[in-house]
Amino acid sequence: MKRLGKIALGVGLVVWTIMPIYNMILVALDDDAAEYSGHLWPSEMNFESFRVIWTQDYWYLEHFWHQFGNSCFMGFMTMVLTVAIGSLASFGLGRMRLRHGWVLGHVALLTYALPASFLAIPFVHIMHRYGLSDSLWSVIASQTMFATPYAILIFQQYGRLIPLELDDAARVDGASPGQMYWRIYLPLMAPALVAVGTYALLLAWNEYLYQFLLLSSTQSMTVAVALDQFFDSDEAPWNYMMATAIVYSLPPVATYYALRRYMVAGLTMGGVKG
Amino acid sequence: MSGASQSLEIGRVSPARRPFRFGTPRGSERAWIGAFLIPYGAVFVAFLAYPVAFGLWMGSSPALYGHLARDPKFLPTVVNTLVYVGIGVNVTMFGALLLSGYFLDKSRWIKALLVLFMLPWALPAIPAFVSWHWMLISHHGLVNSLLDQVFDIEGPIWFNEYWLALGANIVATIWKWMPFWTLIFLAGRMAIPQDIYDAADVDGAVGISRFAYVTFPLLGNLYLICTLLSTLWLIGDFTTVNFVSNGAPARMTEVLATYGTHLAFQSGDPPLGAAAMLSLLPLMIPLAILLIRKIRADELQL
């Protein structure tokens, strides 16, 4: 009886999880773009929409691969900068003899509690002042800024697992703080670095508002913004849109499943306790 | 205590006595600290502190709030935000807490299920929410087709009715975020030592009473922190509402994040938009302070 309940719940969870994803595939494989058919199964396997994306054979998708490249660049730079800035700051705060380091830690945490959309309006104005409007770098800056406090928090927690005696030994051997950071801290922090990097990538890939507000030209646009253009149009071919959505979803899903072990360990190790 | 938390305990002792061992930093050491902290400091000042200050300045004129109060859309939007966040957060967190118990199961197929269950979290928000919109739109969306062809029920036009549209936003948000919190609670539960459960077993606490008297009190703090965090995040959520209901019907399901953004960029009144966002600050500041106190007090991470 108990086992039956577990199986029932499992089936329910599968349906609940899969349904929107199944819907994406269903619409993407639909051959009739204008009329939504209401089939529960794809009537035929029609990969036309994926071919259109591959060859950029539709005017909404003219720059698709360029925009896909933009998304990748933005995600990758956010990842690298978050890991670099976060690990430097966490080393400075956690392993150096800084008197009031905790103040900075608190302030960083405060950002963690700041909802992204609350900052969007002034942020766009400031980027204009910096001369960064319509630049991918403005989006990278915003995502790095939001991801770094979390990075610092995780790195500081994880860093506690690395004995400070290692630093002392290195210091006795004449290592500079820079060498201690590069040769001891970073290699030992590898799992946390991977976890936080993946987190930053997923965050940037998930994000929409800042890209929508900051990027306006076709050249600087990311796929997220381009997808939204389909939405604004009255006669957009929905199968192309859903196929685009599927292609756009592949990199983060692949990254997550490839690095799942690190992810879970990094998110949970060294801290979650009741 | 388990092995992991024990090594944590050891690690935790050092930082406290650490700063006094060598005295205060001098000379080159000082320069190094600067070098480590300057990148973050620069990002913080240029991309956070300055915009925040600018935003506060934009929304500082009291006249803006008078203007907002006279807008017939403002109060319903605040109510929507509170309903959306209130129901969304609590269902997500409580569901995640219960499901984390389910996923503790050691059998192989439940472990495989967890891998699948995490998919909504890894999936980017926009494709997911666009798909939710499409599942519910018109009579031919997947949900209504299912209702029609399998159960022979004529489904409603979801985005024509206020409660259904608001409900769709809430359900989509739960779908997207419950996996992440389930994983966090799962980790929290796995950190509870087995001996506590064994002791509870002896005392006869099983099933619901075990959950109520053992698991929940032990996870209480984690639960509170996660709830606060997800509340703050959901208050600022723009993407869900923008893509799932897009305010339908007739801009009735907008939340402050979409409302403020529309004011600022479509109606071309950025200060008013900033003021709309700031109007929830009295609610958010206490939440943020409580959150930070809880996190620091507990040295707990997410």
Image: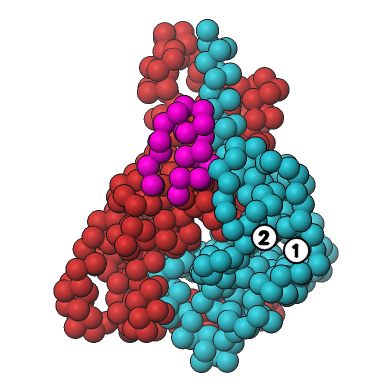
Mark 2, Cα crowd under 10 Å, few <14 / some 14-19 / many 20+, is many
Q: Decide: is B283 above or below A5.
A: below
Horizontal side, residue B92 vs residue A227: left or right: left
At x 53%, y 82%, the residue is: B46
Location of residue A182 (image quadrant): bottom right
| C-alpha distance separating marks 1 and 2 | 7 Å
Indicate the secondary structure of the residue bearing disc 1.
helix
Q: Which chain is cyan?
A: A
Indicate the secondary structure of the residue bearing disc 2.
helix
Label 2, on which residue? A240
In depth, the one of B177 and A230 nearer the eye is A230
Horizontal side, residue A122 vs residue A205: left or right: left
Q: Decide: is B195 above or below B218.
A: above
Location of residue A241 (image quadrant): bottom right
In depth, the one of A85 and A51 nearer the eye is A51
Name the spot of residue B245 as percent of width and height, x first. 42, 56
Q: Decide: is B16 above or below A182.
A: above
Label 1, on which residue? A53
Name the spot of residue A59 as percent of width and height, x first. 69, 74
Whether residue B86 is visible: no
At x 48%, y 86%, the residue is: A126
In depth, the one of B283 and A150 nearer the eye is B283
Whether residue B156 is visible: yes
At x 60%, y 31%, the residue is: A14
Q: Looking at the image, is mark 1 or mark 2 earlier in the sequence?
A: 1
Magenta includes A152? no
Name the spot of residue B38 as percent of width and height, x first. 61, 79
The chain that hosts pointer 2 is A
The colour one sees for chain B in the rendered image is red
Q: Which residues fall within the magenta stretch?
A: B138-157
